[in-house]
Image: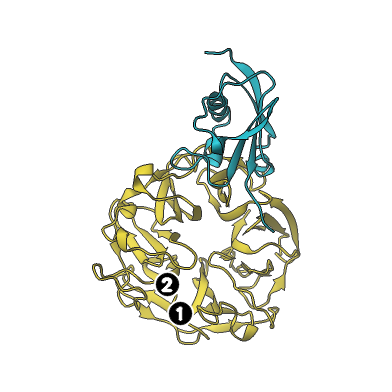
Chain colours: A cyan, B yellow
Amino acid sequence: MSTPIPCTIELPGMITVLLGIRSVEVTASTLAGALQAAYEKEPALRQLLMDESGSFREHVLCYHRTAQGAASTRWMATLNVPLTLGDSILIMQAVSGG
Amino acid sequence: MRTQLFVGTKKGAFLYSSDSARESWKMEGPLFPGWSVSAVARDGAGGFVAATSSDIYGPCIQRSPNLREWKIAEKSPKYSEKSGFKFKQVWTFAALGNSLLAGVDEAGVFRSDDHGETWSELKGLSSHETRSAWFPGFGGLCAHHLITDGKDKIWCGISAVGVLGSKDAGKSWVSLNQGVPVLIKDENFKGIGTCVHAIQRDPENSQRIWRQDHVGMFRSEDGGESWESIQEGLPSTFGFPLVVDKSTRTLFCCPLDSDEKRYPPNGELRIYRSTNGGDSWKKLSCGLPSSSYHAVLRQAMAVDNLSGEVQKGGVYFGNAAGEVYASNDLGDHWQRLQGSLPRVLFVEAFVS
């Protein structure tokens, strides 16, 4: 088990409207752990991001940002991905078209 | 007395506050900017609950002490994963004793015993023997109206199922649609497949219930066991909102041309009023526009019940064009309030 490190989870504007915060600061050693810590800190966040099955809602995107770039959780087999100092998490809404 | 109008739209809510004559109005908002706001009610403890939803982030419950400052409830209604049902939107709130009920899409009713902070499903309704034969209307499979006797009796309007009633605070339910034409016939179950649009009860007699249905206006004198048409005098059978002024038992509705066109007949936006329980209807037009081709949606009409010796009750509605209209004399005269809002989903009036 690696050492827990501080990590910022940045929230989209529509969620800021409801919760009054732009981000959540947590300490965790994995991506899954960071999200779980955010849900414990802001309990309403879970229902905004997750559906009945415990998966991200269909149009919610979650990116793990590292020094190498940003990776969408949509293409990850597991969220038990280690965090490195300097990593952050970005939540976005998948809206395209016009 | 002053009235506050809470107007929920597709992209936020707006609050209109009146002077004591209810002639001058001040608008604030948007609250919840960008969020669809579908219902609001008193929470039974001096505060308020509202329902918000987003196509991205789903539905949630909000709580407020004053209609202006809101905080998201930690736990919104939620079906079990095993049920296969999804909670998509709250359509209505109602009080039952000290509890609060929420009618939702997909069709079901949830109950809160802590003024809206947490919710539990009334499983007797969503596991009703006819549930497999429920089909959504154009607006979804939604439990959109709840009326109660304040104690144990609940009537629930579901599109496109009909009215279901409970005499034991929601444990068991029976269909209450006899006399209303069925739109979607089911091979196995009778008594469902009607398309109720709105229900209201007589404030002095819970056995008398009015119903705007897909196929006309109806009245029941026996708590919903049977229905008779009270359509005569209305220009069409189709429409959505139906409200009753509690102080005078006056009914208001807004007929639309048809289920195909869904706009005011001939483009004349008119409210119809009945002062005799639906035996006859009077067209109200003073201050309302012609050449108006926008619907008034299901929950988008409200009353403030302020009729008394020196004043008449207020009636309010909004339409899909984002226009809000107000009358301070039971519909005799109307004024359009300031603002061109997003599509108005509901209007609710609070007196303070």
Mark 1 touches mark 2? (CB < 8 Å): yes
Q: Please say if A36 is above or below B315.
A: above
Q: Residue at x 58, y 43 (%)?
A: A60
Residue B98 in view = no
Question: Considering depth in this image, is A61 or B236 the residue closer to the camera?
Answer: A61
- Identify whether B133 is placed above or below A69: below
Q: Position of residue A81 (x, y in %)?
A: 55, 24
Residue type of the residue flagged with mark 1:
Gly
Number of callouts in the render?
Answer: 2
Q: Are marks 1 and 2 on the same chain?
A: yes
Quadrant assignment, res B214: bottom left
Front residue (pair B90, A8): A8
Q: Position of residue B293 (x, y in %)?
A: 65, 78
Label 1 Cα neighbours within 10 Å, binned few <14 / some 14-19 / many ≥20: many
Label 2 crowd (10 A; few <14 / some 14-19 / many >=20): many
Residue at coordinates 63% horizontally, 53% vertically from top-left?
B352
Return the chain for callout 2: B
Where, quadrant-wise, is the N terminus of chain B in this rendering?
Answer: bottom right
- How far across and how far down the image is residue B100, in percent? 45, 48
Of helix, strand and loop, which one carries label 2?
Answer: strand
The numbered dot on residue B210 is: 2
Q: Which residue is mark 1?
A: B278
Residue B113, percent across and down? 43, 41
In the picture provided, is B120 more to the left or to the right than B322? left
Q: CA distance from mark 1 to mark 2?
A: 8 Å
The kind of residue tagged 2 is: Trp
